[in-house]
Image (tube, helix red, strand yellow):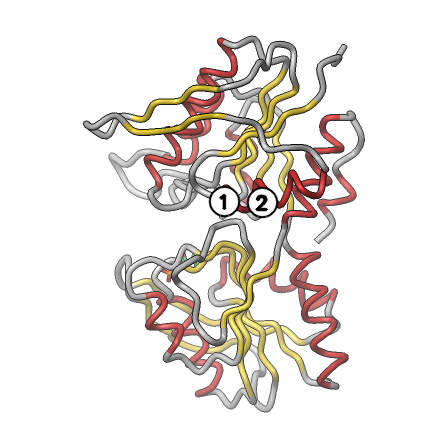
Amino acid sequence: MRTKGLKIFAGNSNRKLAEAICAILEIPLGHARIEKFPDGEIDVKIEEDIRGVDTFFVQSTCPPVNDNLMEALLFADAARRASAERITAVVPYYGYARKDRKDEGRVPISAKMVANCMVSAGCDRVLTMDLHAAQIQGFFDIPVDHLYAAPVINEYFEKLKTDKGIKNMTIVAPDVGRSKVARGYAKRLNAGLAIVDKRRVSGEETEVMDMIGKVDGQVCVLIDDMIATGGSIVDAAKACMKFGAKEVYVACTHALFCGPAVERLKNAPIKECIVTDTVPVEGKEFDTLKVLSVSKLLATAIRNIHFNESVSLLFKG
Ligand code: R5P
């Protein structure tokens, strides 16, 4: 029986999101000290009693990926040794997700290895959002609640459609892998669907081969799970314009914005770039960027997990 309530702690990756979640749930953010030794090792100290407490730790494994991941693992270990009743890793952005299978010889399955580490460290549950590949849920032998940012993004575009009287909206997947997700958005927004035929040239460069579907004269909304270097989304936006789009919006859950991303996005034919706050963008803002908060979705999920209520209503994207 859970008698000692719920506490939420934050790592250094996204304290602002953790604070927003706590504000919604009307509880204070728990005190934990997470610092570095001079040699770079991470040191964690939970500074309040969590014996018998339902403990949540909010940490996106965004850049600096390895430090943020290590903070999460060390926090879980500390919480387990401090006799937390249950430890839930709230990972709004789950990094190391790209390698989810062996697509060539002698490579790791990084997404599985990280899942193993989290379970071994002491996590009892995971709450995450828009995994790069939904099957990563199965890499954890503990319960995973996988939320979608879609309700928040859909609400934004529903309003945009109404406010601007847009009748010709087309959702565009920037590659074939994202087409199923894009189809979901197209259905909910009563919009058309198109798919960019993209080839990846290197980690930073992509090449657009063709456009599947009609974008001519359309208000296009490119949907992706993450923007890293911006190569995929910017090339896709240019392709939409080349194939006759009226204007292009971008909607993406995880704004990693690494390397040349901000410069690329600033100079791209993109009317608005909509992202969420799963990853902080402070210091990387630009004029067309709009940040939507997923704090309410995460707060509701945490509340429901704590009270053993259904989370599945929130899965509806
Ligand atoms: C690809 O499968 C992903 O969904 C993203 O499109 C990709 O990882 C984004 O990376 P970048 O911004 O570097 O092109």
Q: Position of residue 7 (x, y in %)?
A: 63, 25
Ligand 1 quadrant assignment? bottom left
Q: Position of residue 246 (x, y in %)?
A: 56, 89
Residue at horizontal 60%, vertical 60%? 292
Reply above or below: 229 against 83: below
Residue at horizontal 64%, vertical 35%? 145
Which quadrant holds the N terminus?
top right
Q: Is mark 1 in CB contact (under 8 Å) with mark 2?
A: yes
Residue at horizontal 42%, vertical 36%? 111
Q: Residues within 10 Å of mark 1 (few under 14, many from 20)?
A: many
Q: Nearer the viewer, residue 59 or 104?
A: 59
Q: Nearer the viewer, residue 135 or 130?
A: 130
Q: Position of residue 304 (x, y in %)?
A: 76, 33
> Does label 1 or label 2 sit earlier along the sequence?
1
**Residue farthest left in this picture:** 39
Q: Quadrant of residue 184?
A: bottom right
Reply above or below: 271 against 284: below
Q: Quadrant of residue 61?
A: top left
Reply above or below: 115 against 227: above
Left or right of 94: which side holds 3? Answer: right
Left or right of 109: which side holds 3? Answer: right
Left or right of 189: which side holds 7? Answer: left
Reply above or below: 193 against 149: below
**Whole-Å distance between the Cαs marked 1 and 2?**
6 Å
Q: Amino acid at mark 2?
A: Met
Label 2 SS: strand
Q: Residues within 10 Å of mark 2 (few under 14, many from 20)?
A: many
Q: Nearer the viewer, residue 11 or 199?
A: 11
- Report which residue position mark 1 lands on: 93
- Report which residue position mark 2 lands on: 129
Q: Amino acid at mark 1?
A: Tyr
